[in-house]
Image: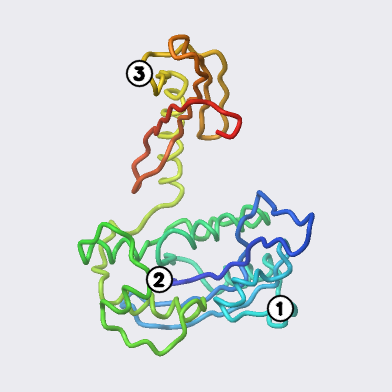
Amino acid sequence: MNYIVFDLEFNMFFRFKEGDLANPALKNEIIQIGALKLNDQLEKIDEFNLLIKPFVYKRLNPYVKRKTNINTSKIIPRKLFMEAMESFEVWVGTEAVLCSWGQDDILGLRENCSFFGFDAKFFNKYIDIQKVYMKFEGLHQQPSLERAVDDLEIEKTLPFHDAFSDAAYTVDIFRKVYDFSQDAIINWEKVQQENEAKVNELKGLLSQTVIYCPECGNIVEKIKESSKSKKYFAHGFCHQCKIPIKHVARIINSDGEFKISCKDSVYTRDS
């Protein structure tokens, strides 16, 4: 089994002129994939570094340009996402586990694959190296990649915020903290199915939540209800305080645990 330690750089919406709108189906568009392939002894056997021509957000966000040092002239002649992913899939091969620093890149990869219609089954298994590092160090707050590099006294010879450089630093961390435990390997589809079941169970409870007046604490009768995705909204009126009440309940994910978060407030046009 090989380990594919990868990192991504994204472009995102920026309002260059009046009327420019973001695409709600794709918040972050991949413009670089950097990866190293390791064997079962964590020895490097190959590397991958590819810039991608953006299709949705064709002009680079100024913040992205400053952060990554990628400019338009570098990406215009490059492959579009589908062709780039076909190359990446062939390079990854079979019997491989994708590894990244945190979940943002694996989520971003799947979001882009879903948007462009690319079958992403080839990376169903992955390892969150940030989580492995946190367990190794006994941390509760997520550290940045650079913070982990400093804490492990890894020599900094490459610039950060370049997909290939960040993947190389992630490999250095991986080698220091990974104990080859199979528990670290996450089956994406299984986790998603379990999470979906948890969310659906909680969705059934959202409408059962009770509205309270934040002024007097009395229970308020609901007069209007609506729901959207993982959110539930209800409106009521406290006859004692003579104020309209707005109730918002949402399903949140806190460190892998799903729960309902509720808030009652006095309703105004701005709330």
108 lies left or right of 141: right
For the residues labelled 3 and 1, the Cα–Cα distance comes to 57 Å
List x then y, in percent, for residue 247: 48, 25
Q: Position of residue 124 (x, y in %)?
A: 47, 56
Above or below 251: residue 45: below
Identify the disc placed on residue 90: none
Q: Is residue 18 left or right of residue 235?
A: right
Q: Label 2's element?
A: strand
In the picture, measured across the screen, residue 156 lies left or right of residue 9, that is left
Please tell me whether residue 95 is drawn above or below residue 37 in the rendered image: above
Residues at discs 1 and 2 in contact (Cβ within 8 Å)? no
The answer for how far apart the CA atoms under marks 1 and 2 are is 32 Å
Asked whether 118 or 103 is in front, the reply is 103
Q: Quadrant of the C terminus?
A: top right
> Residue shown at 57%/31% (left/top)?
228
Residues 27 and 19: in front is: 19
Residue 17: which quarter of the image?
A: bottom right
- Judge depth for marks 3 and 1 and give the one in front: 3
Residue that sits furthest to the front in the current view = 241
Amino acid carrying label 2: it is Tyr
Question: What's the residue at 67%, 66% (across, down)?
Answer: 81
Residue 14 pos. (x, y %): 68, 62
Q: Which residue is mark 3?
A: 217
Q: Amino acid at mark 3?
A: Gly
The residue that disc 1 covers is 72
Quarter assignment of residue 143: bottom left
Q: CA distance from mark 3 to mark 2?
A: 55 Å
Quarter of the figure that contains the N terminus: bottom left
* Image-quadrant location for residue 30: bottom right
Q: Which residue is mark 2?
A: 3
- Label 1: which secondary element: helix
For label 3, the SS is loop
